Image (cartoon, coloured by chain):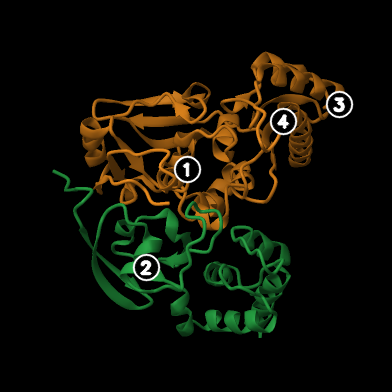
Amino acid sequence: MKPAQFDYFRPSSVEETLELLTDYGNEGKILAGGQSFIPILNMRMSEPECLIDINHLQELDYIKQEEGYLKIGALTRQSDLEKSELAANTVPILREASRFIGHSQTRNRGTVGGSLVHADPSAELPLTLLTLGAKVIISSADEEREAALDEFFLTYLTTDMMPDELLTAIHIPIDSIPKGYAFEEFSRRHGDFALVAAASMLDVDENGNVLGGTIAAGGIDAVPLLAEEEDFNVLIGQKLTEQRIKEVVQKMVEKAEPDSDLHASAEYRENLAEVLIKKSLHKAYQRATESGE
Amino acid sequence: MIKKVESKEKMKIQTVINGKSYEKEVEPRKLFSDFLREDVGLTGTHVGCEHGVCGACTVLMDGKAVRSCLMFAVQADGTKIETVEGLVNNKTGRSLKAAFSEHHALQCGFCTPGILMSSVEFLNENPQPEKQEIKEMLSGHLCRCTGYTGIVEAVQQTTDGNSK
């Protein structure tokens, strides 16, 4: 299994990359960590005419806290995110979720931005960042724009980015981030693609009543699925009960169209989604309660 | 203008492998795993699945364990590489190899080079790991002979050696 031939560019700045994308964006592809993309090339599922290797764009490799956001450069390696104390202290779910991404050897190379752009609906980072209300910064030679993640993922492996655009950063709002968090996933073997994954963020008051939060599940639809606000609101103002959780999960699953494949039937995925969402909510609730004590 | 390397053209790269500097010319599409085996002649790095699942081709790039089949040779330009052949000069590497032999941590040996490289990085970063952490690190490697028990024991013994 060897990739087809391609022309190769190695820009050293974002500016140079955007210039190249203007000229070659349609027939070329960006090469970042390559941990999903190079298998696709090796299997010749894709044969782009040229690759633009952005691994020398040091300016996109950072994690910093600024203006109420945790800002992550698109080229930040997944292992750096996993090990970052700043990320663990400000947004602890990032470390919990990162440990499920592939294996330590692929996390050493795989990037945060690459995972979002690849847009696999069962991947850990798209799901987690969606739960966190993150936005992405997207640049082209003409303009820079922001996109909220709930509008960024369109369907399987497809985002709203144009061929001449480059994802440069991810911004996670941290000023009112819920105290309770949890990431749960089930896969056949550790490091495999998740059959289903779920992430929850929860805030509770001193009486243990839910104040707010978000839930999202991956692997049950063409995009990671965020619970709609009106569905989530069923949980607000009271303690977490099995009945309420069931109600929310049912509303989420109703909107999903899980696939049946070699690995799991659609029914099984729906069932698994219920189990994992419930588990993540309980864990997030417990953490939120403990943090208030 | 940013230089374009045409698909049939060869690009000059410079890389230090196991302490020795190499200057070679390669086509952009050449996988780094193939470069190591075919251009440099270091056949200790094994090629299994060629899509990042089996872990046999794992090498250290600037100290980090990476899949050499999920990289192009042109991307190794300017980096420092360590392969299984380099472990003779590495204290942890030598202890690991002795422990693997003692615990029967290999049978056919196809997966072993990759496992050794990941284990070296792992023990450098985490000299006193829990057994569960060793298993998680090994989850990135397929071994169809041993059932992993001997491998876990061998890595575990090397950590015990580290504490002495």
* Residue of label 1: A112
Tags 2 and 4 on a common chain: no
C-alpha gap between disc 2 and disc 4: 42 Å
Residue at 82%, 27% (x, y): give it: A240
Cα separation between marks 1 and 4 = 30 Å
Nearer to the camera, B53 or A59: B53
Compute the Cα span from label 4 to label 3.
25 Å
SS of the residue at dot 1?
helix
**Which mark sits nearer the N-terminus, 1 or 3?**
1
Please check whether the numbered discs 3 and 2 fall on a single chain: no
Q: Position of residue B120 (x, y in %)?
A: 54, 72
Which chain has been coloured orange in this picture? A
Report the residue marked by disc 3. Answer: A242
The 10 Å Cα crowd at callout 3, few under 14, some 14 to 19, many 20 or more, is few
Left or right of A257? Residue B69 is left
Judge from the rendering whether residue B52 lies leftward or rightward of residue B100; answer left or right: left
For discs 3 and 2, the disc positioned in front in the rendered view? 2
Counting the numbered discs, the total is: 4
Q: Is residue A237 above or below residue B100?
A: above
Residue that badge 2 annotates: B36
Q: Are marks 1 and 3 on the same chain?
A: yes
**Disc 1 versus disc 3: distance between alpha carbons?**
35 Å
Where in the figure is residue A249, as x and y percent of width and height? 75, 23
**Which residue has dot 4 on it?**
A265
Q: Chain of mark 4?
A: A
Q: Is residue B105 left or right of residue B72?
A: right
Q: In 3D space, how far apart are the residues under numbered discs 3 and 2 (Cα atoms)?
A: 56 Å
As shown in the figure, which amino acid type bears the numbered disc 1? Val
**Image point 64% across, 40% down: which residue?**
A194
**Tell me, what hue is chain B?**
green
Badge 3 amino acid: Glu
